[in-house]
Image: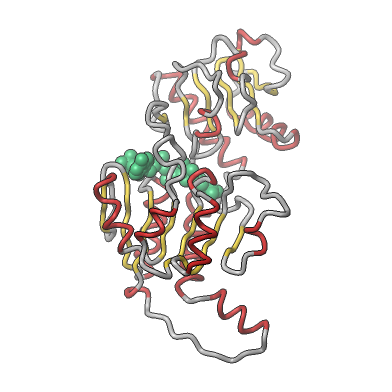
Amino acid sequence: MSIVVYLGDDAETRDWIALLAGLLPEFEIRDFDDPGDRAAVEYAVVWAPPAGGIARFPNLKAVVSIGAGVDHVLRDPDLPKHLPILRTTGPDMVQRLREYVALHVLAHHRDLAVTDAFQARAHWQQIVTPVAGGRRVGIMGMGQIARACARTLVSLGFDTAGWSRSGTSTEGVTPYAGPDGLPEFLARSEILVCLLPLTPETRDILNAATFARLPKGARLINAGRGGHLVEGDLLAALDSGQLAGATLDVFRTEPLPPDHPFWRHPSIRVTPHVASYIDPATGASVVAANIRSFQKTGTCEAIADPERGY
Ligand code: NDP
């Protein structure tokens, strides 16, 4: 019985193969593109596998996503519908996102971009912003990662709300649920943080109608997926002043093309999909534990629901 690994980068794939071989000695660990006997492959551990690739392994028990999102697996039109998909998160991934969200919420809260522009002109001007308790932050998505980010913002004193399908929340965070709760949630969000999974329901959710419901001069941070954002609507909202700034970590096309208007827009900060990352050593131990649990019980806590898309 074997496991195949695909990361789209040979060196990274080799690292993961070596780590998983040490952790799961009962399996043969192979490169997705050099799998040996395809019928012996029971798990595919992947990030953004090529379309049709997973279907080439007839006896797979599950696909393991190297990442919290599973959109990069579900986008394959030939993905066998019956296959369970296991998500991978780890303490380092959650911690990095907490840092990213805190950093960029604080940067917007304290108008750092304006201060940077003043410095570029040697212009001395003090900007006084409210303390965090007077700043309303809204987080779209209240999953495992988003809840940890929300708790960090609460600990900094921000007036924090969370929006999810079911109204899931965490201590100190005002919950809003579903389409009915969205308008009120948006109306209070001076800084909107998107940490949703990309699903048919959430695709294009950061659009002109959403921006119009935010308080004038609101800010956007998108660390979910590029497919959440209607790019032209963001540019229009920044031009009109409805939005005052945006921090974007994820894009419809990655890497972001060099001639893309986001790179040089004075009100947009671009980060190259670095909000979080799974260290291979930590990630491999989470993957190994999930595979062991799935082998033993036929299920595992990290299982995603392909119907819901997350
Ligand atoms: P989870 O999958 O644990 O949770 C998803 C959350 O989104 C849940 O709260 C869910 O609601 C909510 N949700 C899903 N669909 C809808 C909808 N249609 N309307 C309202 N709420 C919805 O998410 P995680 O916190 O683990 O991760 C979230 C996402 O963050 C990932 O899918 C990925 O896209 C992104 N990410 C980005 C990274 C980066 O480096 N930029 C790194 C890691 C993750 P409910 O609670 O009711 O189920």
Q: Residue furthest bottom?
A: 124
Residue at the spot 49% in from the left edge and 38% down from the top edge: 69
User: As rendered, which of 196 and 4 lies closer to the eye?
Assistant: 196
Colouring method of the image = secondary structure
Name the residue rendered at 68%, 47% in the picture: 255
Q: Which image quarter holds the N terminus?
A: top right
* Residue 90 visible, this angle: no
- To which quarter of the image does residue 254 belong? top right
Residue 87, position as x, y percentages in the image: 47, 34
User: Would residue 168 be visible to someone looking at this image?
Assistant: yes
Quarter in which the C terminus is drawn: top left
Q: Residue at x 67, y 22 (%)?
A: 32
Direction from residue 144 to residue 124 in the image, left or right: right
Q: Is residue 91 above or below residue 45?
A: below
Where 26 falls versus 289 (above or below)? Answer: above
Location of residue 178 by image quarter: top left
Left or right: residue 2 compared with residue 296 = right
Residue at figure coordinates x 40%, y 61% from the top left: 152
Q: Position of residue 79 (x, y in %)?
A: 53, 20
x and y, in percent, of residue 204 in the image: 46, 44
Position of 279 compared to 158: left or right?
A: right
**The image quadrant in which ligand 1 is located:** top left
> With respect to residue 240, does 25 lie above or below?
above
Left or right of 101, for residue 12: right
Residue 275 rendering spot, x and y as whole percentages: 55, 53
**Residue 26 image-quadrant placement:** top right
How many marks overall? 0
